[in-house]
Amino acid sequence: MTVSPQHGTVLFVTFSAPPDLDQAKASAGDHRRRFQAGGTVGDGAIYIERSADRELFDALRRGELCYVLSTRQIGKSSLRLRVSRQLRAEQLECASVDLGALGADTATPVSWYLGIASEIAEQLGLEPPDDFWDEHWHLGPVHCWLRWLEDVVLVDISAAIVLFLDEIDATLSLPFSRDDFFTGIRAFVNRRAERPANARLTFCLLGVATPRELVSDPTRTPFNIGRSIRLDDFTRAEARGLRAGLDGLVPDPDALLDAIFAWTSGHPYMTQRLCADLTGELRGLDVDDAVARRFLDQARTEDPNLRYAERCLDAHGPHHGPHHRPAHAAKLLGLYKRLLEGERIAADSGDPVQLALRLTGLSAERSRPGGPPCLAVRNRIFGHVFDRAWVRAREEERAITEPLVRWAASGRKDDFLVGGAALAELTSWADGREDLSTEERAFLSACVGAECQKRSMRRLLSVLAVAVTLLGALALVLLWQMGKEEQARIRAQQEVREKDARRLAAQAAKELAEGELQRARLLAVEAALAARASGRPAGPAVVQALGDTVRGPAVAQEVLVGHGGAVLDAAFSPDGRSVATVSADGTARLFRPGEREAPLVLRGHGLGVVAVAFNRDGSRLATASMDGTVRLWHADGHEDRALAARGGAPASVAFSPDGSRVVAGMSDGTIHVWRVDIVDEPPLVVPLGERVIRRAVFNHDGGRILATAISGTVYIVRADGQGSPMPLEGLGQGIEAAEYAPRDDRIVLAAGDGTARVLPAAAGPGPHEPVVLRGHAGPVRCAAFSADGTEVITASADHTARIFRADGKGVPRVLDGHEGTVTRAAFSRDGKSVVTASEDGTTRVWRLDAPGEPLLLHGHAGPLTSVAVSPDGGRIATAGTDKTARVFRADGSGEPLVLQGHEDHVLSADFSPDGARLVTGSADRTARVWRVDGKGQPLVLGTHDDRVVGVAFSPDGTRIVTTSWNGILRIFEDGGQGDPILLRDERAGLLRAAFSPDGKHIVATSGPSVKVWPADGRGAPRVIPSGYGDRAIAALAVSPDGNHIAIAALDEGVRLLRTDGEGEPFVLSGLGTAVRTVAFSSDSARVVAVSSDGSARVLPIDGQGEPLTLLAPGVMLTDAVFTPDATRVVTATNDGTARVFSIAADPLMSRACAYAGRNFTREEWAQLMPDVDYRTTCHEWKDAPVLDAGAAPRRDER
């Protein structure tokens, strides 16, 4: 292969980390040498190629700066060695420097940089750099090193060079500034524009650290101009490559790999270690025993991966860097605990705590079908070793951490010191410890000093006590009076703030009703802030306002801001990682959604930029401007060249499918076609006899061009300019734009009458019967197909975009949020995201597969009858008329477990107290007990003689109660062995039953009454009148504290009864009539009731305030329960989905701010809140700075 002179030599520099694991013993046999358990993969060992191999090789061959920052023992060294061999085979020169071997702890700047240069010189066959250093002694060390690279290395070597800098975390121990080192690399790369020879040399940085740890100044980091190479654990498909070492040694290699993968989740070292063990010294053991011997039991203290992870979470480990600060260790432990408890946490590459935890090896990013990637415990081995008991022990050992973190965060204020019994516990804990950090010693010293001052003050006060005895009575009276006044003042302030919160919530509802969605969101957030200032939880009115503004069919994941004018076009790069936007402000911008980096600004056009397009591989983009030019740019933001037009200005731009040509619709009524790779060739000009061509695009094979004129006429033109343009007839007036489908010659039209139309693939002069897509309230400015051609997205002057099925079936999905005409809308290539541009100056990226509010759980083929939540909140069970029950993860990730076996509608479901089992009741006259892990066959409780309408586990999980429509209640012992205990009621229609919290009684409905039966079936029931007359009770729930029973009749509201039967029933007004189901929250403070109108309402049991109403437009809710933390309500619906509603203010506030995409303008603030000084409502939204004209392409700071 011939290497381009602009991509010269590649240098690999290596920083050493703690020693790797011992190499596998050579004496274990030939098969042991097939697996590489630790260290660099040697000759004859199995190497598993991952996507990172190809990505790193391709990027370095192109001369890109790359970095691989990942946890230990994942294969960085082997990747470096393999890629360097491949590059050498392509005639590139490579060098690798182990910076850890340079003695970082005691090095001087001169010796350290000279050591790097010496290693590079030796590997590249150059003269030692000592003489160069002596001659340039007047330069700083980093400057001298860079000059040596430019004046010696690039002069003496004509090939491309790659320098590998491995284990860069060794720089954390340097006694001098490491920022200069990384800044030097950045400067070297940035000088390529003025010194082209620098493009022949690039760097690859490898190590165990985060960019933020390595470079303290973000403006000097090379990590925002380089390519990050992700090195992940083996996938199951990749791990198949290990089978070559198992064949002939084990009976079933695939089954063995499956069992190993179930423990390791593809951890490279652990996977290869187990393969080596099970074909060597542990041969004959099963995988579980091998895991226990190698990683669990006593072996857990010997494995370097486990020891390293433990040190990182141990604040008393070696204090030599960010991983080991006590406060940082506490954050890592807290995040790991949340993962261990099953909380779904979205992966965030910008979160330093997430990145640090991943580098410890304890966690990894895992993809979710139909959802964004999430952080998870890395594998079962880590989960077993570092389990909840281990976390609790660490928390107890780190008793000092929490107060220390608060004290440090406050700026070491005395108010955050501890004293009294708490200080006594800390001093006892610290007594004799020699591993206390400087920060911990300072905290304890400050606490002891403050406590001594308090004691001195107390002694002084005791001396004065005698003197003030006579004044004491008067002082007490005064203090009592002052206390009353202070309490009254606080209550008054709380009432004022609560009143403000309700007023703002009502104002938000009014703005929402008037269609001012963004203002409504911001007002709802202000209402929540006012509620928070009162010191009390946000009331139903505030939560209602927040929920109403964020619940909908689609929400923007990210709002891209920065343009100083209307955004006229936007496009995804082919890989979906970048979004290009153009604006009337004369600039184009390249955003990286999700990475929170400032956009790359492309300058060069003299007037507004009207269109943008990427070529097929994303290496180039084209922009069209009213200044009369089309400009080509490299994907890194550097301009390639301008394509001059022959009269007129371009109104659109598009690449051909193969990227070889660019077409533009022109303001002089022509279309221009340029060949991209031929410089200075004039364009092919095709006149259409029109005044302006609004848009021109290629068809799927590049042979034809579809052109839309301002007159509304659409033409089909041969791309080679031959023949006459063919107008499409019968389209009517007002066609704004036309696009081809990506895979065929169907055409979609955007029309001024508010419709889009899909024409069949057959092209010709005659009329065509279109599929008409309706729904917009204003002209449709553009329409485009998805990559697979099954959907169409439209952009309209009504401020919305809509997603339709291309065949016109179903209801369109509305993307609502812009405050001006939506000028452009387009799908990403994978169809999972949409970008919209608007005259409001913003661009929005919408994740179509992201969970919205509420979270929807799909799967059933018919209406749902019941819903239940596991005690730990991690799972949700649904029962449906499709004869199945399903168990979902509460975060919506993964596929649900489908429980099949019932022969009729499933009517009820309940989890066991440990969450491991689920009992279901069915109209097929059986109840079934299932394992929620999907294993085994269900236990059938089948002695019923009528429909089983209710099921419940006892609090200890040993018994199950079922209720049948014919009025018989059955109690089954654990395991369903023997005959059940039968409790007969004289009235048929027994609907619901539940155990009391202590498990001693069963509470059941009986016509218009409630009966409390002994749980052992002995003795007569106690009857509690309901006050409903002769109307039957349809719903029943027992409060977790055992004090109340909630009931509802079909044509009455909800009533609360005392479980002891005393007093009169208390009517909870506001929950509606004809209530179907009722449930308590875990704190027994609230109930949720589902009414026959299809809504659910949440209300405190004291009946105070307005209820919080939960609705699902177009469907009926059929059941509702709280999650264990009472922050969400899970509902069943008649459309076959479960919906999870947030009812806590904080998560809804975050959503509202994210979706708003901005703050109030000062004019809006003055209009809506004239008596309050202006402030920022959502702190994540700030104005972007204005850039100097003529600046070079760079990443701006927001």
Image: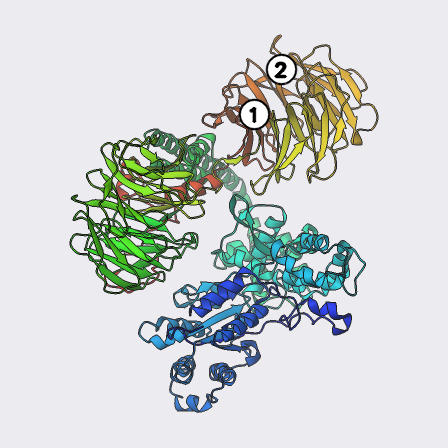
Mark 2 lies on residue = 1033
Query: Crowding at label 1, few (<14), some or many (≥20) Cα neighbours within 10 Å?
Result: many
Mark 1 lies on residue = 863
Residue at figure coordinates x 52%, y 35% from the top left: 856
Residue in front for this viewpoint, 987 or 956: 987
Q: Quadrant of the C terminus?
A: bottom left
Query: Crowding at label 2, few (<14), some or many (≥20) Cα neighbours within 10 Å?
Result: many
Looking at the rendered structure, the kind of residue marked 2 is Ile
Q: Is residue 835 above or below residue 876?
A: below
Image coordinates for residue 1121, horizontal then vertical, percent? 58, 30
Looking at the rendered structure, the kind of residue marked 1 is Pro
Q: Secondary structure at mark 1?
A: loop
Q: Is residue 645 visible?
A: yes
Image coordinates for residue 541, horizontal then vertical, percent? 44, 30
Q: Quadrant of residue 1184?
A: bottom left
Residue in front for this viewpoint, 781 or 1031: 781
Image coordinates for residue 881, horizontal then vertical, percent? 60, 24
